[in-house]
Every structure is written in structure tokens, then in C-alpha cells.
Image (tube, rainbow, N blue to C red):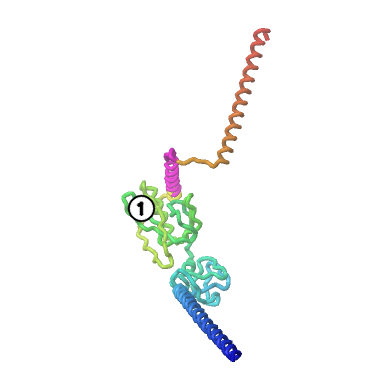
């Protein structure tokens, strides 16, 4: 009887243990899958956000698969058409309609071609590269930026001389740069230079295009005056003379700005030096002091010796 009870109790304990284990396992699995589901849902949300961002920045580009030299006409065989990610809008990049245009610059393999690298016209026969050093260049202008060249007269009148020109090798300090101009544009620039020479206070300067691939070129509004054209025709050297004078005035203006800067009140400038630099300067000052004292003693010795020699000559009749 007792054995039966013990056997039943043991069986009951085993059943209870198994049921408990099953309940614990079910609870654990439920908790585990709930957490996993939440994490999965969160990751899926993040992936969807990233996917939307990537899709928003996706553009279709033409990527050069060969080196394309400047001045050559591009063909569809030169490119791979593929999707890419960019912060720039789609109209910033080359499209199928641009096939057959001319490369303005060397395009290396793997470059994603933008519209600014291409031109619809072949290089015209009267197009020339001209060097200038007679107008203010924006301090943020770099190679291949596009600018308008403008002239401002002392009375405030402001005109566009050249429109949307690619600037090459700009040097802010010397006002030097190169432009590609047609014959008519070269003549207009020559007249503008002479005007800047004739009318004191007239300046030539540049304005930079922010998005040259999107912004349309301005319409030139400068018209050379008849007296200026007459002067250019009569004196063939007037343009060179005017260029030198205008460049000199630009240089003077820069020197004046530097002079004004150097004359600033520096009494409030913090001249605190580090300990090591201060010790080094102190040693240098000390060495300089010793050298000056030695030089003074040397001069004193030479002077004293000279005076003794003079006294001996007087005493001994030398």
C-alpha cells in the first residue's frame, strides 16, 4: 500500500515537473519570439527608411568606360549607363540627348559625366584663349568655374561684358586668369579695358555662377562707346597701355588694403607664448645681450689702445 502511494507520488511529481518545464519553455519561447519580432520590425522600418532615402538620391548616369580627350565628339559606345546615388538632381548629369556633343575637358575612365563637361558646339575657328590681369576675381573662384565679367562705372552703372565664361588658372593675388573668347568678345573686352582706363574709378570684376549646369547664361549688356572705339582704332597700343594702368590700379588697391591691415591697433592682441618658446626666446635674448656687451668691450679696447698709441707718439715724438 505504501509502495503504491510512493509510486503514485513519484509519478505525480514527474508529471508536475514536466508540466512546469513545458510551461516555462512556452513562456520563454513566447517572450523570445516577441522580442525577436519587435527587433525585426524595428530593423525592417530602418531598412525601409534607408531604401526610401537611397531611392530619393538615385540618379541614372553615363559613366565613361574609356578616356575621352577634350575637344572630341562623344558617342554612346564611350559610356556605361547605370544607376548611382548622388545629392545632385538628375538634370545635373548627362542624358541621352547629350550624345554627340563635344567634351570641354579631358574625361578619364570611371568619371560620371555632368553637363558642364560638354558643349553643344564644336570649338569655333575664331575661339582663342586670352590672358587677362585687369579685373577682380572672386576669392572663392577655382579652376573651371563659370563667371560673368562685368564693368561698373563711377556713377553706379553696371554692365555685363562677358557672359558665362569658364575661367582657367585663376590667380587671386595677381588678378591673372585665362578665358576662351571669340573675336567679338575680345574686342568688347578691349573696349571695356579702355573705358576702365579713361574713367577713373571704373572697375572690372567677376560674378560666379552657383549652379552653372542649371543656370542660364546672362545676356551681355555692355556696348562700347563711339569715342572708345575710335580711340582703339586710332591707337593700336592703347589696349596694352590701358591694361597696364588698370592692373597697376588693382595692385595699388590691394597694397592699400594690406597697409590698412598692417596699421591695425594690435595693443589688445594676446601675445602669450608657451613655456618652451618663452624659455627659448629668453635664452636667445640673453645670448644677444652677451654678444652686445662683448662687442662694446671690444670697441672700448680698440679705442683705448688707439689712444695709448697716440699718446706714445706725442711723448716720444713718433
Q: Can I make out residue 97 in this image?
A: no
Q: Provide the major secondary structure of the magenta segment.
A: helix
Above or below — where is 99 with respect to 169?
below
SS of the residue under disc 1: strand
Q: Where is residue 25? Give x, y as percent.
A: 53, 82
Q: Where is residue 67? Give x, y as percent.
A: 57, 70
Q: Where is residue 99? Give x, y as percent.
A: 49, 75
Q: Where is residue 179? Give x, y as percent.
A: 47, 59
Name the residue nearer the viewer: 247 or 67.
67
Name the residue nearer the viewer: 252 or 46.
46
**Residue drawn 52% across the image and 76% down it:** 82
Q: Quadrant of the C terminus?
A: top right
**Residue drawn 50% across the image and 66% down it:** 104
Crowding around mark 1 (Cα neighbors within 10 Å: few <14, some 14 to 19, many 20+) is: some
Q: Can I make out residue 167 in this image?
A: yes
Q: Horizontal placement of 6 versus 187: left or right?
A: right
Residue stretch in magenta: 243-268
Magenta highlight on residue 270 = no
The residue where tag 1 is placed is: 152
Above or below — where is 317 with respect to 77?
above
**Residue drawn 38% across the image and 56% down it:** 150
Name the residue nearer the viewer: 213 or 236.
213
For the image, the number of numbered tags is 1
Residue lying at the far left in this picture: please name it: 155
Q: Quadrant of the N terminus?
A: bottom right
**Residue drawn 45% across the image and 76% down it:** 45
Amino acid at each position: 500500500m505504501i509502495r503504491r502511494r510512493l509510486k503514485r507520488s513519484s509519478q505525480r511529481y514527474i508529471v508536475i515537473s514536466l508540466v512546469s518545464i513545458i510551461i516555462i519553455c512556452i513562456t520563454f519561447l513566447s517572450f523570445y519570439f516577441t522580442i525577436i519580432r519587435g527587433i525585426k520590425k524595428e530593423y525592417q522600418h530602418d531598412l525601409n527608411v534607408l531604401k526610401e532615402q537611397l531611392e530619393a538620391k538615385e540618379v541614372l548616369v553615363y559613366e565613361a568606360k574609356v578616356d575621352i580627350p577634350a575637344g572630341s565628339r562623344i558617342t554612346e559606345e564611350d559610356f556605361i549607363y547605370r544607376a548611382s546615388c548622388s545629392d545632385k538632381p538628375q538634370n545635373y548629369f548627362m542624358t541621352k540627348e547629350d550624345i554627340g556633343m563635344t567634351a570641354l575637358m579631358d574625361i578619364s575612365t570611371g568619371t560620371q559625366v555632368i553637363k558642364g563637361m560638354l558643349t553643344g558646339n564644336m570649338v569655333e575657328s575664331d575661339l582663342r584663349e586670352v590672358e587677362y590681369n585687369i579685373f577682380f576675381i572672386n576669392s572663392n573662384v577655382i579652376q573651371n568655374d563659370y563667371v560673368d565679367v562685368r564693368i561698373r562705372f563711377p556713377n553706379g552703372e553696371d554692365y555685363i561684358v562677358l557672359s558665362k565664361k569658364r575661367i582657367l588658372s585663376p590667380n587671386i593675388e595677381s588678378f591673372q586668369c585665362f578665358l576662351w573668347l571669340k573675336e567679338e568678345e575680345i574686342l568688347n573686352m578691349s573696349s571695356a579695358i579702355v573705358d576702365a582706363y579713361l574713367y577713373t574709378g571704373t572697375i572690372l570684376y567677376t560674378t560666379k555662377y552657383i549652379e552653372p549646369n542649371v543656370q542660364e547664361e546672362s545676356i551681355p549688356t555692355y556696348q562700347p562707346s563711339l569715342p572708345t572705339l575710335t580711340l582703339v582704332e586710332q591707337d593700336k597700343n592703347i589696349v596694352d597701355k590701358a591694361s597696364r594702368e588698370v592692373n597697376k590700379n588693382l595692385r595699388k588697391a590691394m597694397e592699400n588694403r594690406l597697409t590698412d591691415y598692417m596699421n591695425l591697433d594690435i595693443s589688445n592682441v594676446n601675445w602669450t607664448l608657451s613655456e618652451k618658446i618663452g624659455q627659448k626666446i629668453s635664452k636667445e635674448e640673453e645670448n644677444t645681450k652677451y654678444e652686445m656687451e662683448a662687442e662694446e668691450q671690444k670697441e672700448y679696447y680698440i679705442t683705448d689702445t688707439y689712444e695709448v698709441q697716440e699718446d706714445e707718439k706725442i711723448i716720444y715724438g713718433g
